[in-house]
Image (cartoon, helix red, strand yellow):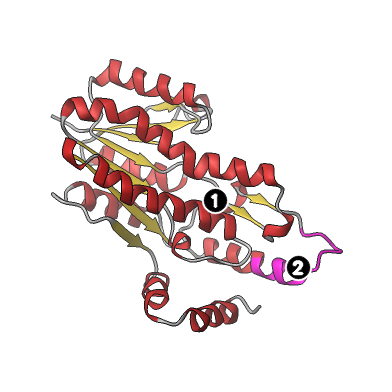
Amino acid sequence: MSKVVLITGGSSGIGKSIGEFLSHKGFKVYGTSRSPERYTSSKFPILKLDVKDVSTISTCVQSLLEKEDRIDIVINNAGVGITGPIEEIPLDEMKNHFNTNFFGPLEVIKAVLPQMRKQQSGLIINVTSIAGYMGLPYRGIYSASKGALELATEALRMEVKAFNIKMTNVAPGDFATNIASGRFHAPVHENSPYKLQYENTLKLMDSHVDSGKDPIIMAEAIFKIINTENPKIHYKVGELLQKFSIVLKRVLPDKVYEKMLLNHYKL
């Protein structure tokens, strides 16, 4: 019997690549979008879901269960970017960001757990970010939201273990997607004390995304995790240097690591 997969944010970027790859491998894949009517040519069904709207999460899960009567795998992929000096990012934008990147995935998990408990099986994969392992300049709020999801997953994983439900994090590095166009940018104010540094950092971040790896690499990694009997707590997918930066953070003194980041971003 083909396993049923639900991918939030499955209409573009990494989510779309994962969905197409898993569909090709014989899984019954359902993606989600706030506007599914825009994706009529998708290679797998797109259901309506807004991670910031709990009622749409509940409706989506119920609709999927009516179609398939089970949910085997959930991939919490929906997320947004945010950049700017923390001092200059409006509080509402920070809260909106956390609602999408942190509270939203938790609500999706809460919505599917009763069914997975009933099945006595299930796998939840939370897509985080290598940026969630470190506080990055002008991406501090993004780093914080992804880091929070990493830690919450560690706790949830232990809480649901008794029900034979498995959970893991997958932290991608930079991939060639449209995340840069969709993220919130705090404006570069002419009279801002951060103007020059923030402007230069933005250009560097965008160049990293533009030259990023093909999202199919993430799809292959997800497929491998699905076929792993006991998934690890954390996975990292991306350039060797990006993954190695996490190792360096663990072994280097804090100030040495901070200096390394300052040099990288030319700050």
Give yes or no for residue 192 being in the magenta stretch.
yes
Give yes or no for residue 84 being in the magenta stretch.
no
- Say which mark, if any, is on residue 25: none
* Quadrant assignment, res 252: bottom left
Q: Earlier in the sequence, mark 2 or mark 1?
A: 1
Rendered location of residue 242, percent (x, y): 42, 70
Outermost residue toward the top in this view:
66
Quarter of the image with the N terminus is top left
* Quadrant assignment, res 265: bottom right
**Residue drawn at (39%, 53%), measured in percent from left and top?**
150
- Say which mark, if any, is on residue 194: 2
Q: Amino acid at mark 1?
A: Ile
Q: Which residues are magenta?
A: 188-201
Outermost residue toward the right in this view:
191
Rendered location of residue 191, percent (x, y): 86, 64
Rendered location of residue 55, percent (x, y): 48, 21
Q: Is residue 65 above or below residue 25?
A: above
